[in-house]
Image (cartoon, rainbow, N blue to C red):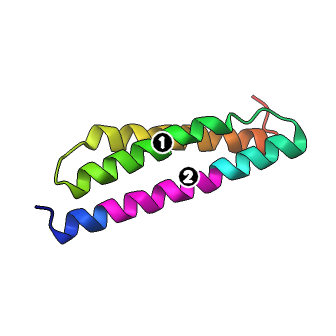
């Protein structure tokens, strides 16, 4: 059975996935308004990974690799979205 620490960890991961969904919406809005390709659909992958990791955390299983991959993926996608929106040249 899961203890309170696991449940709070799962809750924070689900909140993180909600924040990623807000970034998804920002990318979609920017693409619709300005016509620049933002790859906003890729933000669904780290959100799903965080939800999966949160569920596994609530069940007491250690799936740290899934959380790490979701965090790295969301970081990379956020930097790409930032560069597109701020028109940063390579």
- Of marks 2 and 1, which one's residue comes earlier in the chain? 2
| Residue furthest right in the image | 34
Quarter of the image with the N terminus is bottom left
Residue 47 appears left or right of 43: left
**Mark 2 nearby-residue class (10 Å; few <14, some 14–19, many ≥20):** many
Residue 32 appears left or right of 24: right
| Image quadrant assignment for residue 6 | bottom left
| Residue under the image location 30 percent in, 52 percent down | 55
| Residue furthest top in the image | 90
| Residue under the image location 29 percent in, 37 percent down | 65
| Residue under the image location 24 percent in, 53 percent down | 57
| Image quadrant assignment for residue 19 | bottom right
Compute the Cα span from label 2 to label 1. Answer: 8 Å
Quarter of the image with the C terminus is top right
Residue 79 appears left or right of 52: right
Q: Which span is picked out in magenta?
A: 10-23
Mark 1 falls on what kind of element?
helix
What type of secondary structure mainly makes up the magenta span?
Answer: helix
Q: Circle 2 is placed at which residue position?
A: 20
Q: Is residue 86 visible?
A: no
Q: Circle 1 is placed at which residue position?
A: 46
Q: Position of residue 85 (x, y in %)?
A: 78, 44
Q: Is residue 12 visible?
A: yes
Instruction: Pick whichever, 41 or 38, lies toward us.
Output: 41
The reply to whether the C-beta atoms of the residues labelled 2 and 1 are less than 8 Å apart is: yes
Q: Position of residue 59 (x, y in %)?
A: 19, 54
């Amino acid at each position: 059975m899961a203890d309170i620490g696991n449940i709070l960890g799962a809750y924070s991961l689900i909140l993180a996935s909600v924040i990623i969904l807000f970034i998804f919406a920002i990318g979609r809005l920017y693409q619709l308004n300005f016509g620049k390709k933002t790859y906003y659909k890729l933000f669904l992958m780290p959100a799903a990974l965080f939800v999966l990791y949160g569920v596994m955390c609530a069940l007491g299983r250690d799936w740290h690799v899934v959380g790490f991959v979701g965090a790295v993926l969301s970081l990379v996608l956020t930097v790409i979205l930032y560069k597109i929106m701020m028109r940063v040249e390579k």
